[in-house]
Image (spheres, rainbow, N blue to C red):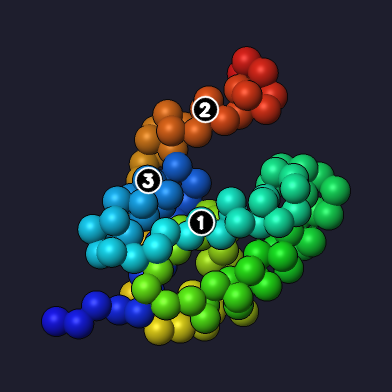
Amino acid sequence: MSLPKRVVLVGPMGAGKSTIGRMLAKELGYRFLDSDRIIEERCGANIPWIFDVEGEDGFRLRETAMLAELSREGATVLATGGGAVMRQENHPLLKKDAMVIYLKTSIEQQVERTIDRYRTQFGQL
């Protein structure tokens, strides 16, 4: 069995895309990429700030451009942002030369895995 050129992990925030992606990339000998982290690095701002300033539409345009760029990479495991699958135009970019894997999780697990991020940003809930 031959390996896919790319593996793309999709699913909601807190599903484990980054954690599993790093482990899978190491196992396959691929490079790990996280589209949200790359967007933050290039913008010099975090995702919530980008949403506040540019709105969701502005962020989603950045995300689509990033996915178009990353779809040309080989031997990679890509962790996408939780909303990447919501835009129809992203679908061919996600599937290009790739095996797409949906990571499912419960609401309880999502809350448990993401609560600290929200506390850091917004204080105690």
Query: Which is nearer the N-term, disc 1 or disc 2?
Result: 1
As drawn, is 58 to the left or to the right of 109? Answer: right
Residue under label 1, please give it. 34
| Spatial separation of the CA atoms under disc 3 and disc 1 | 10 Å
Q: Amino acid at mark 2?
A: Ile
Among all residues in the image, which is located at the extreme left?
A: 1
| Residue pictured at 28% horizontal, 64% vertical | 29
Residue hosting label 2: 115
Mark earlier in primary sequence (3, 2): 3
**Left or right relative to 42: residue 38:** left
**Picture residue at 37% right of the left edge, 73% below the top:** 75
**Location of residue 89 (image quadrant):** bottom right
Pick the front one: 17 or 25: 25
36 with respect to 110 (left or right): right
Residue 65 drawn at (x, y percent): 68, 72
Q: Residue at x 83, y 54 (%)?
A: 54
Residue 100 shows up from this direction: no
Give the Cα distance between marks 1 and 2.
20 Å
Residue placed under numbered mark 3 in the picture: 19
What is the C-alpha distance between the residues marked 3 and 2? 16 Å
Q: Secondary structure at mark 2?
A: helix
Give the amino acid type for the residue marked by disc 1 in the picture.
Answer: Asp
Quarter holding the N terminus is: bottom left
Q: Earlier in the sequence, mark 3 or mark 1?
A: 3
